[in-house]
Image (spheres, rainbow, N blue to C red):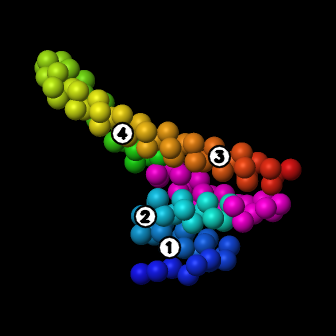
């Protein structure tokens, strides 16, 4: 199903709320990034800041939980001497770390390029 080419700020906020209800936090991030990028010289409202925060918190939180679980399994396999599995696990943990880095870089870029400048 195709979405309209360009949603208004209000429509993106609504879609972010809808995505939150559906627990589709990656999409919630996308909608709130669009809101933040349309801010220009206008600050985010308290509600918009909260939505952006919730979106990133959940996207990051899911990856952090995955990282902790995989790291725990990695330690167990290391203690058992299963080096083949440890190698596989380290590669998988690396994939999660790349995702975390990408997400963190995304919010930092958004802060630097749109949110902090509009707060002056």
Q: Are there few (<14), some (14-19), or many (20+) residues within 10 Å of tag 2?
A: some
Sequence-wise, which precedes: disc 4 or disc 1?
1
| Drawn side of residue 2 relative to residue 74, left or right | right
**How far apart are the alpha carbons under marks 2 and 4?**
21 Å
* Vertical arrangement, residue 57 with respect to residue 6, above or below: above
The kind of secondary structure element at disc 1 is helix
Instruction: Please name the residue that numbered disc 4 is placed on.
Output: 95
Magenta stretch contains residue 84: no
Sequence-wise, which precedes: disc 1 or disc 2?
1
Instruction: Please give the name of the residue rendered at 42% of the width and 81% of the height, measured from the top-left corner.
Output: 1
Instruction: Please give the name of the residue rendered at 72% of the width and 45% of the height, measured from the top-left corner.
Output: 112
Magenta stretch contains residue 43: yes
Residue 26 picture location, percent across and down: 47, 59
Q: Bounds of the magenta span? A: 37-59
Sequence-wise, which precedes: disc 2 or disc 4?
2
* Vertical arrangement, residue 48 with respect to residue 115, above or below: below
Residue 90 picture location, percent across and down: 29, 29
Specify the quadrant of the image occupied by residue 52.
bottom right
**How far apart are the alpha carbons under marks 4 and 1?**
29 Å
Specify the quadrant of the image occupied by residue 81.
top left
- Asked whether disc 3 touches disc 1, contact meaning CB atoms under 8 Å apart, the reply is no
Spot the residue most to the right: 120
Viewer can see residue 60:
yes
Q: Nearer the viewer, residue 3 or 72?
A: 3
Instruction: Please name the residue that numbered disc 1 is placed on.
Output: 18
Instruction: Please name the residue that numbered disc 3 is placed on.
Output: 109
């Amino acid at each position: 199903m195709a979405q309209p080419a360009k949603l208004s700020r209000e429509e993106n906020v609504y879609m972010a709320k809808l995505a939150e209800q559906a627990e589709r936090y990656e999409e919630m991030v996308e909608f709130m990034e669009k809101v933040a990028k349309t801010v220009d010289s206008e600050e985010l409202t308290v509600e918009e800041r909260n939505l952006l925060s919730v979106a990133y918190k959940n996207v990051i939180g899911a990856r952090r939980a995955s990282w902790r679980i995989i790291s725990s399994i990695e330690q167990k396999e290391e203690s058992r001497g299963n080096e083949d599995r440890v190698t596989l696990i380290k590669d998988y943990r690396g994939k999660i770390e790349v995702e975390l880095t990408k997400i963190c870089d995304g919010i930092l870029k958004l802060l630097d390029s749109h949110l902090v400048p509009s707060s002056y």
